[in-house]
Image (cartoon, helix red, strand yellow):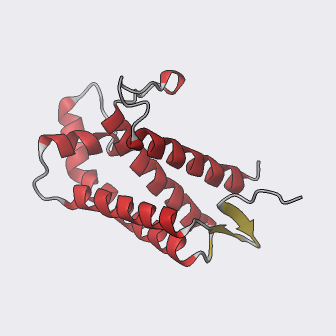
């Protein structure tokens, strides 16, 4: 009997992400699209609303402090995400062994894509009621959101050994 081997597994002290060619190309395309959104010097309001969840509010009760925080931290947060995109692009292309730090970067990248898709699908912030806006339940974006959620869950499971 053949056992299903998921796309994420431990190998020695590291981890391997072994996606099929189509899935790897899709992940690379999505990170490329998100990279373009994050580096657009003059994003339109729709693009801004899509990436808003990538920059959570640090000071919800103090607008002045929030503006200052975003001014000071946004560039660093963007650079961190772009660096993580490089890691996931390499990991899904090479299929080589990555360390725990790179695995966390992969998980952060997958989650960033999910957050943007969630904004597109109007998925709420409450994890107990993660409903999708009407009409999106059978959309390709929703299927992609589900796939990436599953892939992230596999990463977490393998990383934590559960």
What residue is rendered at 30% in x and 28% in y? 60
Report the side of 136 relative to 126 (left or right).
left
Q: Quadrant of residue 2?
A: bottom right
Q: How many tags in the picture?
A: 0
Report the side of 93 relative to 78 (left or right).
right
Q: Quadrant of residue 85?
A: bottom left
**Residue 97, relative to residue 121: is it above or below?**
below
Assign the N terminus to one quadrant of the image. Answer: bottom right
In x, y percent, where is residue 65?
23, 36
**Residue 84, relative to residue 158: is it above or below?**
below
What residue is rendered at 44% in x and 61% in y? 27
In x, y percent, where is residue 126?
46, 24
In x, y percent, where is residue 153?
61, 46
What residue is rendered at 66% in x and 61% in y? 8
Q: Quadrant of residue 100?
A: bottom right
Q: Nearer the viewer, residue 51 or 4?
A: 4
Residue 57 in sight in this render: no
**Residue 17, relative to residue 140: is it above or below?**
below
In x, y percent, where is residue 50?
27, 42
Report the side of 29 relative to 143 (left or right).
left
What residue is rendered at 17% in x and 59% in y? 40
Residue 36 in sight in this render: yes
Q: Residue furthest right?
A: 1
């Amino acid at each position: 009997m053949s056992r299903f081997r998921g796309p994420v597994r431990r190998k020695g002290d590291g981890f391997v992400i072994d996606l099929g060619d189509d899935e790897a190309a899709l992940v690379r395309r999505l990170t490329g699209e998100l990279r373009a959104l994050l580096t657009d010097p003059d994003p339109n309001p729709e693009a801004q609303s899509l990436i808003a969840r990538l920059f959570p509010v640090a000071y919800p009760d103090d607008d002045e402090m929030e503006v200052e925080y975003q001014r000071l931290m946004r560039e660093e947060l963007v650079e961190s995400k772009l660096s993580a995109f490089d890691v996931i692009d390499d990991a899904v292309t090479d299929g080589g062994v990555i360390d725990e730090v790179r695995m966390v970067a992969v998980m952060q990248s997958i989650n960033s894509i999910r957050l943007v898709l969630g904004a597109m699908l109007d998925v709420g912030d409450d994890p107990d009621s993660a409903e999708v806006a009407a009409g999106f339940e059978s959309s390709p974006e929703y299927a992609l959101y589900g796939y990436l959620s599953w892939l992230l869950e596999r990463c977490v499971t393998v990383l934590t050994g559960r």
